[in-house]
Image: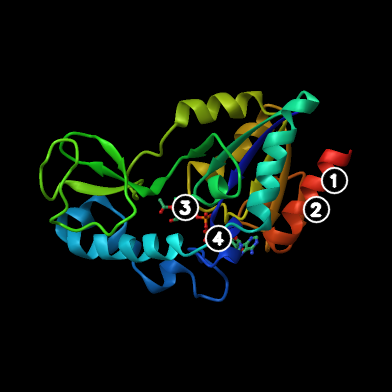
């Protein structure tokens, strides 16, 4: 069994990080305009506002803790090899809650909030403090060149070759806590299905892609993911 797991904001919702889109209209993108805060053009126009947005999210992340869904996925990743299987964990989330829940080899296709990248020299560093237009790159010493190491709208997600290689080999594809509305991640299920993988959606409610999944499990990730992992490992 080779399982490809794709996670989204819903897996971290119960850790207090919030989602981008939800039916109650309280998601991050209902309160903040992504075109003013999450594009390269927005950063060029108003870097201080973009820094402030990510500083707020970074501080929020540093006070959050992983939930039962993160630890259940870490357990699955740890135990599958002993049973002749393997799991690839790809997340759209920029938080580090999978890692803090015990997972390793997490593929962060939209980057990582606790890292900064220098636009001048390309160096990537750990970043736990706030960033500003006066921040200095520890590698090249230039001022004002650091940006959050995250993928913005209009930029290409990271690790796409590695992701498509894992999708091609997957016997099972599981999508957890994602609305299925942002590509290319939203297209992974069809790719896996076309290559014969069994597909399963775990979400609070049917996603935009619900029709494409063979199996659906609805409810809060902290309940449904541990139950799904228990069933899989005891089967
Ligand atoms: P969304 O906010 O679009 O979707 C989150 C999904 O999680 C929704 O379908 C919710 O119903 C579900 N959900 C909420 N709480 C849940 C819970 N407790 N248990 C299970 N499911 C729950 O987030 P993503 O799909 O991750 O990209 O968004 C994809 C990308 O859009 C993000 O990576 C981000 C955003 O714009 C960039 O910033 C580039």
| Mark 3 → mark 1, Cα distance in angstroms | 27 Å
Mark 1 element type: helix
At 40% from the left edge and 39% from the top edge, which residue is drawn? Answer: 157
Looking at the image, residue 70 lies above or below residue 3 = below
Q: As rendered, which of 130 and 196 lies closer to the eye?
A: 130
Q: Earlier in the sequence, mark 3 or mark 2?
A: 3
Quarter of the image where one finds residue 110: top left
Looking at the image, residue 205 lies above or below residue 84 = below
The quadrant of the picture occupied by the C terminus is top right
Q: As rendered, which of 4 and 212 lies closer to the eye?
A: 4
Query: Which residue is at the far right?
Result: 235
Quarter of the image where one finds residue 3: top right
Q: In this figure, which residue is indicated by the disc labeled 4?
A: 65
Q: In this figure, which residue is indicated by the disc labeled 2?
A: 227
Q: Earlier in the sequence, mark 3 or mark 4?
A: 4
| Mark 3 → mark 4, Cα distance in angstroms | 10 Å
Mark 4 element type: loop
| Mark 3 → mark 2, Cα distance in angstroms | 23 Å
At 44% from the left edge and 68% from the top edge, which residue is drawn? Answer: 28
- In the rendered structure, the answer to whether residue 175 lies left or right of residue 150 reads right
Q: Is residue 134 visible?
A: yes
The quadrant of the picture occupied by the N terminus is top right
Q: In this figure, which residue is indicated by the disc labeled 3?
A: 95
Q: Are marks 3 and 1 in contact (CB under 8 Å)?
A: no
């Amino acid at each position: 069994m080779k399982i490809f797991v794709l996670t989204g904001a819903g897996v971290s919702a119960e850790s207090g990080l919030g989602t981008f889109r939800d039916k109650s209209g309280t998601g991050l993108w209902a309160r903040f305009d992504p075109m003013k805060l999450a594009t390269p053009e927005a950063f060029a126009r108003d870097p201080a506002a973009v820094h402030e947005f990510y500083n707020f999210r970074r501080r929020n992340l540093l006070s959050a803790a992983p939930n039962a869904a993160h630890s259940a996925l870490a357990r699955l990743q740890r135990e599958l090899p002993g049973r002749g299987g393997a799991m690839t964990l790809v997340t759209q989330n920029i938080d580090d809650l999978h890692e803090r829940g015990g997972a390793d080899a997490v593929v962060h296709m939209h980057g990582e909030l606790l890292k900064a990248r220098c636009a001048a020299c390309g160096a990537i560093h750990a970043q736990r403090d706030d960033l500003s237009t006066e921040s200095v790159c520890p590698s090249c010493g230039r001022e004002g060149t650091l940006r959050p190491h995250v993928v913005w709208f209009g930029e290409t997600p990271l690790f796409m070759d590695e992701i498509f290689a894992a999708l091609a080999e997957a016997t099972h594809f599981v999508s957890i806590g994602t609305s299925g509305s942002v590509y290319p991640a939203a297209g992974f299920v069809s790719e896996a299905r076309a290559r014969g993988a069994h597909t399963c959606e775990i979400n609070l409610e049917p996603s935009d892609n619900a029709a494409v999944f063979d199996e659906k499990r609805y409810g809060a990730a902290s309940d449904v993911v541990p139950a799904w992992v228990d069933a899989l490992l005891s089967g």
